[in-house]
Image (spheres, grey):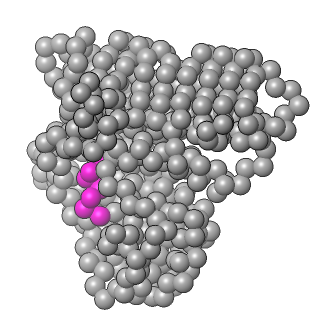
Amino acid sequence: MNLLFFEDAMTVRFYPNALTRPLDDMRLGVLTIGEKWLHETGAARHSRLLRPWLGGVFEAPMPDPERHWVWILSRSVPLAGIGTELNGLRMGEGLTVDGVPIAVAMDGDDTLRYFKQQAAFADQFWSAFEVKHSPADPLRYRHVETNFQGIAFRETTRARVLDHAWDFSHHNAAEIGRDIPRLRAVETLDRWTERPFFATHPERVFVGKGVKIGIGAMLDASAGPIWLGDHAEIMSGAMLKGPVAICDHALVRMGAKIYEGTTAGPWCKLGGEVQAAVFQAYSNKAHDGYIGNSLIGEWVNIGADTNNSNLKNNYTSVKVYDWESGDLLDSGLQFCGLFLADHCKTAINSMLNSGTVCGISSSVLTNNFPPKYIPSFGWVTDTSIDVFELDKALSTARTMMARRGLGLSPAYERMMRYLFSVRDGRTG
């Protein structure tokens, strides 16, 4: 099987967190959405239709026209058994979830044709930005129109469609439990002969290569499994209550309290108190403070004693800033916290309301509660929201990425320059 990930118009509901990556690259549970599909299907190869500004930042190999492809909606999440249904699809057949097309079997020639259409549109997109200095609005970005005319769809219950960014934290605990069997982990803590720490149900604590667990740490898997990826480290006195995923090279600092539904993506650092929060990768919340029911991007740094509200005092459902309309949208959730996009920073002692949305490279530097929406490259002080100058933002990004041995590629810088030009989401 060969998979091609595509996005639809609802992708905007996941902005600004998804502005800097395709939805199939978003982490939910232990794995990214794309990795989940690859594990469930055993696909030999995959590609994706990228939004133009993501080209060169993420891989999108040219589809082989000699092969058949199954198109997968990037905001759909597979459940057990979906691989069997996909294998049964003939060309021109597809699957829906609640009427939303999530999979379509298409021949290689048609797949390549759409792929080339996307490439041609990307050329027009960058010409408008770099030559005409008229950047296209990401809200009005035209996804490749397939309409899937003539496709014979049938409904499936073996997948879930994500509708909003808050679905990540809401479904994260369950997805941790689904991902661990996909990874076919073989080592568990009950096989460790020396355990200078405390573990309940050690047979449900799954450990990768080179894992370190400090003296006096507590790992409670009584309510759900715990995943410790390769070279993850749990320092002395840290407490984890599953379901929890600490991914490859991630670190949980001394005395931290990590509650159910939390994922620390690769190379993340967690300290203080964290609950039902999804950290993508390379982000730090290394000190005391509370983060709950939140979606955190990459290269985020959360200052010491930063706290967010995830519950309103009147116990009504939390309203979240809708990036598409500019209005507050009722999440329908009683518990809903933060949405911090890539390269966001908070100062020490920051306070953030439930449902706060912070754009790319935004900085919270105020002693008061900031607005519930901070535009990308917003520099928030007690008196104003200024613009974080692009060159300074890029310099900060280079410095942070260099600490992990990574560089800022020309494609990544071009993406950031484009996103700076449309930083409030609605103007060119």
Could you say which is closer to the camera, residue 243 or residue 74?
Answer: 243
The answer to whether residue 350 is visible is yes
Magenta span contains residue 13: yes
Viewer-proximal residue, 343 or 175? 175
Q: Main secondary structure of the magenta part?
A: helix
Which quadrant would residue 5 be assigned to in this image? bottom left
Q: Which residues are magenta?
A: 8-14
Q: How many marks can you see? A: 0
> Would residue 334 be found to the left or right of residue 225 on screen?
left
Look at the image and tell me in which quarter the N terminus lies: bottom right
Residue at horizontal 56%, vertical 47%?
A: 176
In the rendered view, tell whether residue 27 sits above or below residue 232: below
Q: Residue furthest right?
A: 193
Residue 110 percent across, percent down from the top left: 38, 83
97 over 273 or under it: above or below? below
Residue 111 % position (x, y): 40, 78
Point 45% across, 48% down: residue: 171
Residue 267 is left or right of residue 189, and the answer is left
The image quarter containing residue 146 is bottom left
Query: Could you tell me which residue is drawn at 51 percent across and 38 percent down?
Result: 261
Vertical position of residue 179 compared to residue 61: above or below = above
Q: Is residue 207 magenta?
A: no
424 or 407, nearer to the observer: 424
Give x and y (percent) for residue 45. 56, 69
Residue 416 in the image: state x and y as whole percent.
30, 40
Q: Quadrant of residue 348?
A: top left
Kindly identify the residue that appears in the image at 66 percent across and 55 percent down.
181
Judge left or right: residue 124 versus residue 198. left
The answer to whether any part of residue 245 appears in the image is no
- State the residue in front, 78 or 405: 78
